[in-house]
Amino acid sequence: MTFDTKSYISKTDLQQAQALAKEGEGAVSMASESGDLALEKRAQLASTLYLRNSRNSSMPPSSSPELMTGEGNVVIIDDDGVLRLLTQRMISKLGYKVEVFDNAREVLHFFEEKTTRSAFKPQDVDLVISDIVMPGISGAQLAKELAQKKPGLKILLVSANAPQFHEINEDKQPFMQRPFRHHELAETVKRLIEGEDNGEGTAE
């Protein structure tokens, strides 16, 4: 497979690419592309790996985990275009309505009703899924601000760096470590939206 990141290659990028390739029984190579076509190609490659992971090739088809679908409105924030698109596709396939943002400040404006979105209104949001490491306002900081703006709002933080997250997770926000399988995300989202999570963290 080919997996290219942003304009730079970070240690986290490489670790995530290697983890995805390993679980998808693939390999890692480097490429340099730009624009929407590159983003779409990266999303397709990542989708292939995630779908293979969710099916779990070590298990016979009959025993593959069934995806838990549901209803609700989900906001996704990630500054990485391919991960943002991939997460959007995964959540949409589960039956949820989705709005996506590439930075935390836009999300805050959305909840302050300073921006117009067509899918649903801020007061109708059931779950926020946010990357932790982002330029400007981090996912952890965003979670704190959203908790003040909308008490009781369910927030799921995701990252490839679990140790770093646990060091800053003072509020015990639910957390998933990347890469995760589609059925794992489905179970976590359904549990959070339906109120079955105790708010003290989730799958690592």
Image: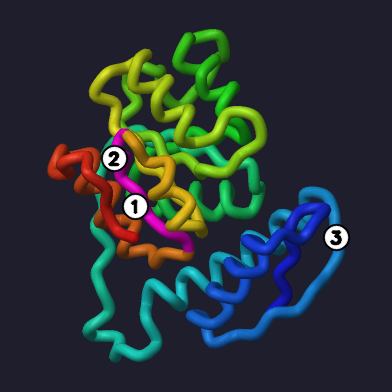
Residue 53 within the segment the image draws in magenta: no
The image quadrant of residue 140 is top left
* Residue 73 location (% of width, % of height): 35, 33
Q: Which residue is mark 2?
A: 172
The residue lying at 24 percent from left, 69 percent from top is 66
* Residue 54 location (% of width, % of height): 38, 72
Q: Which residue is mark 3?
A: 33
Q: Which one is nearer the viewer's eye here, 62 or 135?
A: 135
First along the sequence among labels 1 and 2: 1
Secondary structure mainly formed by the magenta segment: loop
Q: Which residue is mark 1?
A: 94
Q: Amino acid at mark 3?
A: Glu
State whether residue 141 is above or below residue 56: above
Judging from the image, what secondary structure is the residue with disc 3 in?
Answer: loop
The residue lying at 71 percent from left, 59 percent from top is 10
Give the magenta-colored segment's residue range: 171-178
Q: Amino acid at mark 1?
A: Leu
- Give the quarter of the figure containing the C terminus: bottom left
Judging from the image, what secondary structure is the residue with disc 1 in?
Answer: loop
Judging from the image, what secondary structure is the residue with disc 2 in?
Answer: loop
Q: Amino acid at mark 2?
A: Lys
